[in-house]
Amino acid sequence: MAATKFNTEAMEQCRTTVSSQAGQFGAIGDGFSGQYGNPDIFGKLGSSGAISGAVSAMDQAGTQEFEAAEKVLRKVEGALDAIQTNVANVEEANKNSMKAV
């Protein structure tokens, strides 16, 4: 059976990058929150309410999408952390099971 090698440094760099990106997506989503359009900013047009509603819907959709992206990236970060922990635990157990001859 071939030996499996894990590049722990690369995995940690990937986990750290994913964590950073998750925070950035979350911050972008937070910037959308509560930015609802007032119909008056579009003047006295008959469609001002519809335009305002569309802007508000876009704001809500942006918030939801960026929150979803942040959640997915947080899950990826957690999965990478679990892999790192499991690999380290297995390596430690294997090391401890070896007996000096």
Image: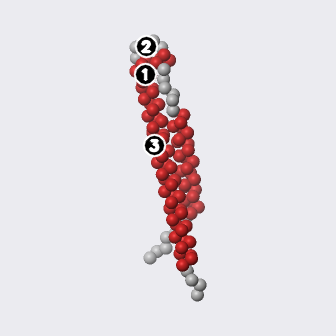
Colour pattern of the rendering: secondary structure
Q: Which residue is mark 2?
A: 45
Q: As displayed, is residue 26 above or below residue 14?
A: above
Mark nearer the viewer, 1 or 3: 3
Label 3 secondary element: helix
**Distance between the alpha carbons at the discs numbered 2 and 1:** 10 Å
Q: Percent from the top left, x then y, of residue 83?
A: 50, 62
Q: Residue at x 54, y 46 (%)?
A: 21
Question: What is the number of callouts on the image?
Answer: 3
**Distance between the alpha carbons at the discs numbered 1 and 3:** 26 Å
**Distance between the alpha carbons at the discs numbered 2 and 3:** 35 Å
Q: Which residue is mark 3?
A: 68
Amino acid at pointer 1? Ile
Amino acid at pointer 2? Leu
Residue situated furthest bottom in the rendering: 101
Q: Which residue is mark 1?
A: 51
